[in-house]
Amino acid sequence: MRSRSVGVVGLAGLAAIVAGAYAAPGALLAVAVVTAACVGIGWPHFLGIPAKKTLAVLIGLPGIGSAVAASYLPPPGFLDWTPAFVAAGVMAVFVMQLIRGTGQAQRLESTLGSCAGVLLSCLGAGWIASARFNGVREMLLIAAISAAIALLAGLIRWPDRIVAPLGIAGAGLAGPLAGLVLSDIAVLPAALVGVVVAAVLVSFRRLVIIRGASLNLPAVLGMGLAPVSAVGSLAYFIDKLLII
């Protein structure tokens, strides 16, 4: 598949997150669980590392656990268990690599890449925390709109030196505009969310370009949803630090 499909998957994931946040209780948790599972399955395929099935479990399960915890923990500690799930996933990856033994192919790349996948999978719980924070969803919506602008910019087949600034500037403007139209969130937090979210997403676009080779469906799903998962926690912490 073409790398452009990664951006389309990311947009679909954002749409599902927004729909889940405004749908029946539990819908956003279902979206987060599916997202974590897709990241777990697809991330090893994108990295091209061995033991893909085992790593899919070790990457996906901590993300699912983090999402479930964020859905049921009392406020304000929505993400209190997320570091524990990240640590458990990282330790499981190291144990698995020890079991594989020395001399195995791509052992270092597999370890480091899988640990990054665990982190990305667990950070998806931030979307749930953002939706539950103060009982309002404005920051979630602003983050999703900013991310959508950055992903749409990434679909343009221009060099990174043009697309990256365009995506960051567009998201940085879209955040405050969305804040003014859809909520009473101040310009500074909304703009900061837009810039930070876009910076993360355009960085992942660069990873896809560097990868070069054609991606299979699991790799597209994993790489499309991994950065979308990560920016949920960024939006939550910016909301918590700058608005409260």
Image (spheres, rainbow, N blue to C red):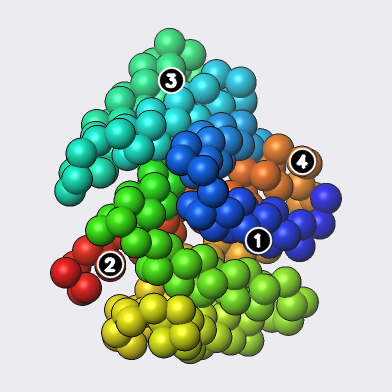
Side of 74 relative to 148 (left or right): left
Residues at badges 4 and 3 in contact (C-beta under 8 Å)?
Answer: no
Q: Nearer the viewer, residue 163 or 97?
A: 163
Distance, label 4 to label 2, CA atoms, is 34 Å
Residue at left 52%, top 22%? 57
Distance, label 1 to label 3, CA atoms, is 34 Å
Give, as a three-letter code, the residue at label 2: Asp
Residues at badges 2 and 3 in contact (C-beta under 8 Å)?
Answer: no
Side of 6 relative to 225 (left or right): right
Distance, label 2 to label 1, CA atoms, is 22 Å
Quadrant of the image containing the C terminus: bottom left
204 to 42, vertically: above or below: below
Distance, label 4 to label 3, CA atoms, is 26 Å
Which residue is situated farthest in the front direction here? 24
Q: x, y percentage for residue 236?
A: 32, 59
Q: Which residue is mark 1?
A: 11
Residue at left 38%, top 54%? 131
Distance, label 2 to label 3, CA atoms, is 38 Å
Residues at badges 1 and 4 in contact (C-beta under 8 Å)?
Answer: no
N-terminal label among 4 and 2: 4
Badge 3: residue crowd in 10 Å (few <14, some 14–19, many ≥20): some
Residue at left 71%, top 38%? 218
Q: Which residue is mark 2?
A: 239
Q: Which residue is mark 4?
A: 217
Q: Which residue is mark 3?
A: 97
